[in-house]
Image: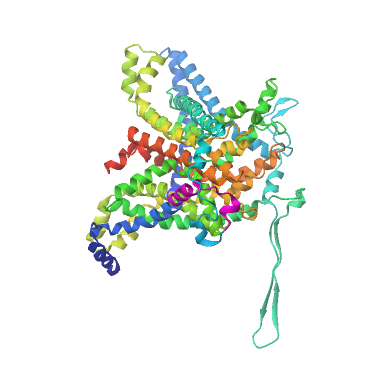
Amino acid sequence: MSLLDGIGRRLKANARSLALRPLEAARDAAYTANGVRRGEISPLEPLKTVGATLGALLVVLLLLFPIYWILTAALSSSGGSIYSSGGLALLPENPSLQPFLWVVGDLAVPGYTISLNVPLTDLALVIDTPEFVMLDVSQYGVANPSGFKGFLWNSLTVAIPTVVIAMALVVPAAYALSRREFILRRKVLFVYVLMTQVGGGLGVALLIGLYTVYVQFGINDSKLALALYYAATAVPFNTWLLKTYMDGIPVSYEEAAVVDGAPPWRVVTEVIIPLSTAGLATVFIFTFLTGWTEFVVAQTLLGTENYTLPVGLYSLISEYSIPWARFSAFALTFATPIMLVYLFAQRYIEGGLSFSGMEG
Amino acid sequence: MSTVSRVARRVETIPFLEKRDVSLLFVLPGLFVFTAFMLFPVVYLVGISLTNADPASLFAGEGAASVLTFGEATFVGLENYVSVLTDTQFWNSFGITWLFVATSVVLKIGLSLGIALVVTSDRVRGKRLMRSFVILPMGLPAIFTVTVWRGIFSSAEFGLANQLLSALDLGTVSWLSGRWSAFFAYNITEAWLAYPFMVIITVSALQDVPGELHEAAKVDGAGYVARFVHVTLPSVKRPVLFASILTAAASFQQFLIPYVFNQGGPARANELIVVYGYREALSFAEYGRGAAISLVAVVFIGAFMWLNVKRGRLADGVAEQ
């Protein structure tokens, strides 16, 4: 709960500083205007500032334009064309949520028939559960909804085992690397740092070997085998990340616990684990995303009925006809939760990047 | 406790190991799984590359035994390597890969240095907010970004790039069916994919440049450009170099962009080396050749990283601890 509290407090602080920012800006502007009027500040200075800010804003908007475009494409019912007869149109003409309905499809809990045999008699208690229909997309003119829910289920059944396996491998290793001194420790760390940087591409290069081995063992269409592979690839980076996080916990806390007579396992459960919650959460997110977003291996190993979300997204595009609106809506539904998670974890990710070699 | 100390006592009886080395047991499972999925495929790849494996022969046997004999594939020695290294297709792919590394790295450094300068400039208001928006693409899954850019460069019913061109009355380009226009599209996408990482590192380097240096240069009468060349650049050189090395390795191994855009086409002209190996094995069923190509790529990536780790001392941090 303390983690949630922390997030809530941080959000509140962020919101307050964001709300107060226009006020501060107005105060600054008034101060500058006064200065200019009194001739203390050259009138060129504020003009330069305004110009530079507008220029920077333009750069940011240009960089993020693809994201904006995909959003407008998803909201336009016809397909994302920013170029209409009237020139460039930055807002879709007839915004509609229909593409998103196509992605989500019907939301309904089908009715079940439950029969309970009453013991020692021939009687049976038959209960028909009612059918819950939350959303029936055919009412909105969507005939063939996408296979999003199937892909989602596949993605979940790949990503969750990945997290479980990876955490089981990563957490003890990170603790040992951070707190204990033992033979080969430096060598292991060195290999892990190296692998953080080359892991991804190496995976594709080795895919042929992996694929043939999987096919020969007959596990190439198994989601659990895929999850095991993902967990293995996630080990170096996440171990290194968690180890660095644990390095930041003062050793004196553990010493205090030892002085109080705590056995080693209690030092871990009462001191290390609670203090590294944020680090654990980050590792959790990263390992989850490994399974959630990987494309190449999933596409090579899995059969059509086991496609995960990234493979499903890829299967939407083809050379000469792209269903723009539906493709965009699918892509956004897939990516937006990840983007939100990333926004939360942003400072950890930046921390993770700066330590990976710069600071040591 | 008792089990732990029992294990510890047993470890002590093994030569070279001390009691504290029990902690190695915490690391071993992760290390074992990782090597099983990284090292074993490498060894297996070496094996396949020495045979004439194709799907019919490789998957002929059943069960674990056939894994070790590579099915019914026959041993052909270094034949695959000879045929790969004498194939013009391979050298084309090799050349285009290095060209891609060169152009995309230059583009990435230029773009991200520019962005970093803009979002750290003293004149710009709301820098911090802009910074967190600029690095937003990093939070997007790679497959999302690449498919969206595939859509942008699509010639199907006006992709975004063609819409912009026709809005400017420049006609349309079928981006992905020309060799160099596709190569250009790869570069733009790669730059957009990688700039947040570079920007983060460059921004933190720029913030570490002491303000006094700039003040001193100003007093000496240096203009903006002179200050940039003589004060800013030398101070950020090392971190930017570090980021460039990593991003160069990423460019060398780029797979998703060419694969999703047009399978390394048109007519296999733009197959970056990883795509080339992948397609040779899985699209053209030449497992032996594909394995040989992949191994050559792995050797190059390994040599590149090893050189940089040695020379750029990337692992300094490990040695210190």
At horizontal 43% and vertical 27% (from top left) the residue drawn is: B120
Tell me residue A1's x, y (percent). 44, 56
Is A90 magenta? The answer is: no
Q: Nearer the viewer, residue A4 or B214?
A: B214
Figure check: B186 above or below B294: above
Locate residue B166 relative to residue B208 in the image: left or right. Answer: right
Q: Which residue of the protein is positioned furthest toward the bottom in this rendering?
A: A120
Give the magenta range: B38-60
Magenta-drawn stretch contains B54: yes
- Viewer can see residue B129: no
Residue B243: % across, % down: 41, 32
Quadrant occupied by the N terminus of chain B: bottom left
The answer, for residue A124, to whether it is visible in the render is yes
Q: Quadrant of residue B21?
A: bottom left
Q: Is residue A333 left or right of residue A230?
A: right
Number of disc labels: 0
Residue A201 image position (x, y, % from top left): 48, 41
Q: Position of residue A31 (x, y in %)?
A: 44, 22
Q: Is residue B321 left or right of residue B169?
A: left
| Image coloring type | rainbow
What kind of secondary structure does the magenta stretch mostly adopt? helix
Asked if B238 appears above or below A339 in the picture, the reply is: above
Q: Quadrant of residue B176?
A: top right
Which of the two residues, A12 or A206, is positioned nearer the viewer here? A206
Quadrant in which the C terminus of chain B appears: top left
Q: Which of the two residues, A47 or B308, is positioned nearer the viewer here?
A: B308
